Image (cartoon, rainbow, N blue to C red):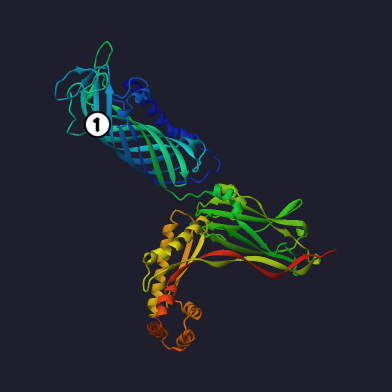
Amino acid sequence: MKKNLTISKLLMLVIMAVLPFSMYAQEGKKKGKPVERYWYIQADGGLSINHGDLANYESWIFEDFNHYKSQALQNWNAHLGIGYQFGKVIGLNLKGGYGLLSGHKHKNQALVFADGPAGVYYDLALDKTNYIEGNLNLTFNLFNMFNYNPRRVINLVPHIGIGGVYYQAGAVSHIDANDNPETPALAQAKTARDLTFTVPAGVEITFNVAPKFDIFFDYTYLFTGKDNLDQTMKIATDEANHFVNDMDMYSQANLGLRYKFNNPCDIEKMARESKKITYRVSPDPLVEDENHNVCFDVIVTIPGEYFEKKAVMNLKPYLAYEGGQIDIDPITFVGEKVSGEGDFRVNYKEGGEFTKHYCMPYQKEMANSQLMGDPMFYVYDGKIYPTQEEIVNNAYFTRGATEKLADGVIHIDEWETILVNDTSYVDEPVLKCIYFFNKDKYNINDRRKLNKEADATFKSLIDENVKRIEIRAWASPEGEEGHNNELSNNRCSAADKQMRDLAKKVDGVQINGKGYGPDWNKFKELVANSNLKDKDAILNNINNAGNQQQVIKDMCAIYPQLEKDILPQIRRAEVYTFEPKMVITQKEVKVKKNK
């Protein structure tokens, strides 16, 4: 078995040697996807498999693995590593780890390396060689040699490297037919560690589960420079009966996780989801004005968490008519990490609404036309390409869905002005829950029992997929103005932290807030609606006082109900969501005259 593995070693080294040349043979002339170069960290762990003189198998490795399963599962290893991907195919990683090896061997002669009794033995067992190892590996992504795709779900990645293993060999004992120790150990576990080089070679199957995360399965052979990891040397069975000068080897079957420090720019996803972008044109339909010009605004709304930070979008508007089209100046949108300038810069988290104004002379071909828009996406490579023709010639790109933007164009002699209802929507704040606080405090847990209801309400908002939340925090109006302003800000921060803790597993929840200081209006409202006998007198005194804070303190001494029932309701942080409210207005619209 060991001779066969040596042949496998040679074949694998030959394959690894020709991989770089194969890579260059696959390079094409067509403009390919931009290459992502990035650092990564990884961790992996799994089984160590002994391929030395006291191996864990007699015949096929998995057949024997089942027989020695309980013993083989004790041979584990684990690694931490760091690496860099240089381009489409080649990468480099450095990793180190710890592991254990043990083994059984029946009916096979072996010479034991030991200071004790020397001799040739049969039926031996190795009890846990432990090792610390490190290696530097060159990796080759085979699939990317033929078709580069940084978003491919599955990749095949062979690797080869150089390293070292620092090990302490385990004890070697006689065993009987049932693998039980028969005699005291022939060779005790070495107290001194030994060091030798390794040549790791293997293959990795990676599964890209997210833009920054890979799960991978790796199988690696490690060929060592010494033959005493198991303290034995196998004796050849050929006629010469000489010792086989063959080094120990072991392998590892590991499962791992990799985190990539890259800034992925997935323009394919942007193209697939281009319907998320909304377009409006004002006016719609387009009209010729008194100066025989066609003037209009193109309004583009890009949602949050859509526009990649290093992406560029070129929107090409044009008037399409039967037999041709009239091109209009394109609009360039750039991501927030693009250093070049476009017409508009788009924030990844917030998106935005952008308006481009156009004005052009009327042409007769416009009479029966439609305003269309073609979006095209590409990764910023240091240059902004103003036209789609230049993009096609110079960059890797994807196209989004063609959109109809507006009808056009009504000739000046054919339109009249009418009034129509224009329906629009505005976001209206709606109070959902309130957190309450003790006097001069901003700890939510001080009123834990009362605030549990607010927590429950907020959790239900998350379940309803609410994405925008606003906090408005207040202080009761007794006390100094500056203190109350600081207190309301602290209450806002406390409510913000509480909600972020509750929503930490939910992406895209936007929480904003502000402290508003003392709430005089709420105090007066509560007093006016209370059952206090002298509420009118209390309000008059406060409205006419030069020092209103002092008047409230004096009133609290006279009317304890103020401190007991009124002021605690003001020490609060209100939580609002926003719901669309329909607004109807009238506007002038130009339409074709009825003939």
Name which quarter of the figure residue 386 lies in: bottom right
Location of mark 1 (residue): 129
Q: Secondary structure at mark 1?
A: strand
| Residue farthest toward the left in the current orientation of the protein | 116
Of residues 400 and 325, the one nearer the viewer is 400
Crowd class of label 1 (few under 14; some 14 to 19; many from 20; radius 10 Å)? many
Tell me: residue 90, above or below residue 524: above
Tell me: residue 508, above or below residue 106: below
**Image quarter hosting the N terminus:** top left
Name which quarter of the figure residue 486 lies in: bottom left
Of residues 171 and 87, the one nearer the viewer is 171
Residue in the image at 47% along x and 36% along y? 24
Of residues 568 and 77, the one nearer the viewer is 568
Q: Is residue 61 left or right of residue 324?
A: left
**Residue 125 placed where, x, y %?**
24, 24
**Residue 564 placed where, x, y %?**
40, 76
Of residues 47 and 381, the one nearer the viewer is 47
**Image quarter hosting the C terminus:** bottom right
Q: Is residue 573 visible?
A: yes
| Residue farthest toward the right in the current orientation of the protein | 595
Residue in the image at 36% along x and 74% along y? 440
Tell me: residue 463, above or below residue 84: below
Q: Is residue 336 visible?
A: no
Q: Is residue 424 left or right of residue 482?
A: right
**Residue 343 placed where, x, y %?**
57, 61
Q: Is residue 586 left or right of residue 109?
A: right
**Residue 151 placed where, x, y %?**
50, 43
Q: What kind of residue is marked 1?
A: Thr
